[in-house]
Image (tube, rainbow, N blue to C red):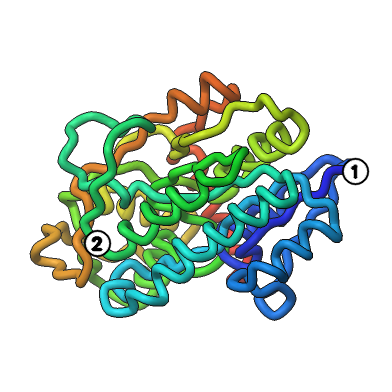
Amino acid sequence: MTAILITGGRGQLGSALRRHSWPERVRLFAPARDELDLFDPAAVAAFLRERSVAAIVNAAAFTAVDRAETEIAASFAANAQIPAVLAEAARQADAALLHVSTDYVFDGRSAQPYDVGDPVNPLNVYGSSKAAGELAALRAPRAAVVRASWLVGRDGTNFVRTMLRLASERSVVRVVADQRGAPTIAADLADALATVALRMATDRSAPAGVFHFANAGATTWRDFAAAIFAEGARRGLSTPRLEAVTTAEYGAAALRPAHSLLSTRRLEQDYGIKPRPWIEGLTGLIGDIIGDDA
């Protein structure tokens, strides 16, 4: 039996990880916040030891990008302090650690997709806290950092759920058109993380370090919204008029990278994982969301 700990198991990605079809030989633990205090090193170490945890997948994070600009301490506590606690606990337990990070560690000034070795230069507090969390996680003897971009899933608050809600509330929706990246379907990322976690849990020579995962295909937030509305219209939902705006016109509190495509080449080379196009995953995702809300 292989024991795996999922942290942040009630969040968007954590929920997708819990729904993943794990092999029967896997014993999955996904404790709620009141069941395991991730800020308590002794409690985390005891949890791993008592359950013989072989791998940790850290999906716990402070992801409110604009709120992080004023809630700096909370952002760094969740995004940097927790990975540090998990890295030390993983060292003590001889467990592998997978830590999920973000494209927002980059400044968006590259015209090419970012590779895993490119220098980070975050533009906002959220990105800075996640960059610090990467360094903390990589202190574990066997650690992998998996950066993802524009995460969307059937749970929680995300761009797809927001656009579907706004389609029913407004006749006009304004969406930024000058930020370019790639959506990541949470279920697809969960599948990839499970593959890496199982390999690292059972093979001490499994590739480690930094990896990127995002679904294939570049887009803008505006064009992503258009695809969401088109799929919604196919299902009989209202279709608002889409108005493209610039980042400056939108006026968010936190700066965002203008270009944050991620190269997934290393993940494909080392683990054989080749992400499908995001547009292929969008149909099923919207079906899941509408079904949940019906």
Residue under the image location 38 percent in, 32 percent down: 116
Residue ranking furthest to the top: 269
The quadrant of the picture occupied by the C terminus is: bottom right
Give the CA distance from mark 2 to mark 1. 42 Å
Residue under the image location 45 percent in, 61 percent down: 80
The relative height of residue 86 versus residue 172 in the rendered view (above or below) is above
Mark 2 Cα within 10 Å, few/some/many (few <14, many 20+)?
many
- Quadrant of the image occupied by residue 261: top left
Residue under the image location 56 percent in, 22 percent down: 270
Query: Residue 29 shows which numbered tag?
Result: none
Query: Do residues under tags 2 and 1 come within 8 Å of each other at their CB atoms?
Result: no
The relative height of residue 77 versus residue 287 in the rendered view (above or below) is below
Identify residue for label 2.
124
Q: Which amino acid does label 1 sit on?
A: Met
Identify residue for label 1.
1
x%, y% of residue 26? 84, 45
Q: Is mark 2 on a helix, strand or loop?
A: loop
